[in-house]
Image: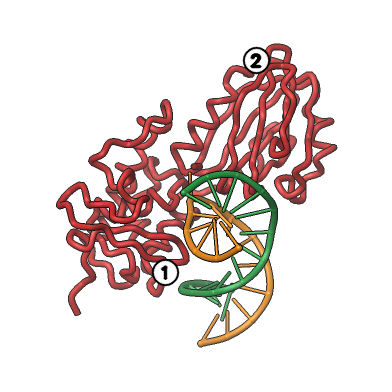
Chain colours: A red, B orange, C green
Amino acid sequence: MPELAEVEYNRKQWDPGRGQTVLAAEPRHGKRVFRETDAALLARELEGKTLLGSEASGKQMLFRFSGGCWLGASLGMTGGLRVEAADFKAGPHDHLVLRQRRQSLVFADPRQFGRLRLDQGAERPAWWRSLAPPVLSREFSAAAVAAYFARRAGAPVKAVLLMQERFPGVGNWMADEILWRGRVFPKTLCGALTTAETRAIWRQTRWVSRTALATIGRDYRDPPASWLFPHRWAGGGKCPRDGAVLSREEVGGRATCWCPECQPPAKA
DNA sequence: CAACCTGTTCGCCA
DNA sequence: ATGGCGAACAGGTT
């Protein structure tokens, strides 16, 4: 379930490998996850290198190796990182296995919407440096959000919250959670949002991100029942605020859930 | 068997 | 050039 907090959780799964050498790097069946990256070259370059550390930014991850090697990873819809035994045998969806003396670091992704890439250099790769400022940074200001909504005036706010160039890390369930907390109807066009609604979305984007990182990002614990999150899946879910039956519909091309009582359409 | 899915990217069109 | 939208990608799950 890779959105902001799940990405952070996955990033930490490789922490046991920090400070240890990659004895062998095995790219496997997956072709699509490597995109324009040469998988064989990636494997050659990583062999003998030491995993020094990692960081996450939005839905992207970057693993730093000795010798100026950087392994970039994103998880798409179904990707995941995990640790297995040193002699673990890879399955059909395990696309990269990094062998270390004490364990294997595994990247898996059945649908292969995720991605792996390799960069070399003393500095972080250019694509990483051009990622949007995190929503918990000072650059993610209410004014920046308002300006972005002005530029996307004709699109429904639900669709715009999914745009990583302004809301890095926000995915489908986070977008619904933010709109529910901000009491904004998901189909509202960005150009029709009031100043108060824009500000509420800005504040809730930060709150949901921070709180998700402290729960899901820490130990994959589900958010509490007071969130929309646990109620939005099954048909007939009820709003944890007022008990109204939740609405479900496709908005901006994605399944969207909202409470018709606390998030009504604006009156004409 | 059919429908559904936590994400991006591309091509088409206005 | 910019913005909005639908399709495509690939496989598992319900």
Q: Secondary structure at mark 2?
A: loop
Outermost left residue? A242
- How many numbered callouts? 2
Query: Does A230 sit above or below residue A151?
Result: above
Front position in the image: A146 or A103: A103
Could you tell me residue C4's position as x and y percent?
A: 46, 74
| Labels 1 and 2 positioned on one and the same chain | yes
Front position in the image: A145 or A204: A204
What is the chain identity of the residue bearing mark 2?
A: A
Quadrant (top left, top right, bottom left, bottom right) of the C terminus of chain A: bottom left
Residue at image position (50%, 49%) is A132
Residue at image position (61%, 35%) is A62
Q: Secondary structure at mark 1?
A: loop
Front position in the image: A128 or A113: A113
Q: Amino acid at mark 1?
A: Arg
Residue A152, numbered label: 1
Q: Residues within 10 Å of mark 1 (few under 14, many from 20)?
A: some
Which comes sooner in the sequence, label 1 or label 2?
A: 2
Quadrant of the image occupied by residue A122: top right
Residue A76, numbered label: none
Q: Decide if residue C7 is on the left or right side of residue A30.
A: left
Residue at image position (25%, 56%) is A199
Q: Decide if residue A246 is on the left or right side of residue A40.
A: left
C-alpha gap between disc 1 and disc 2: 45 Å
Front position in the image: A134 or A20: A20
Query: Does A232 sit above or below residue A159?
Result: above
Residue at image position (34%, 62%) is A248
Could you tell me residue A123's position as x and y percent?
A: 66, 35
Could you tell me residue A206's position as x and y percent?
A: 33, 44
Q: Residues within 10 Å of mark 2 (few under 14, many from 20)?
A: some
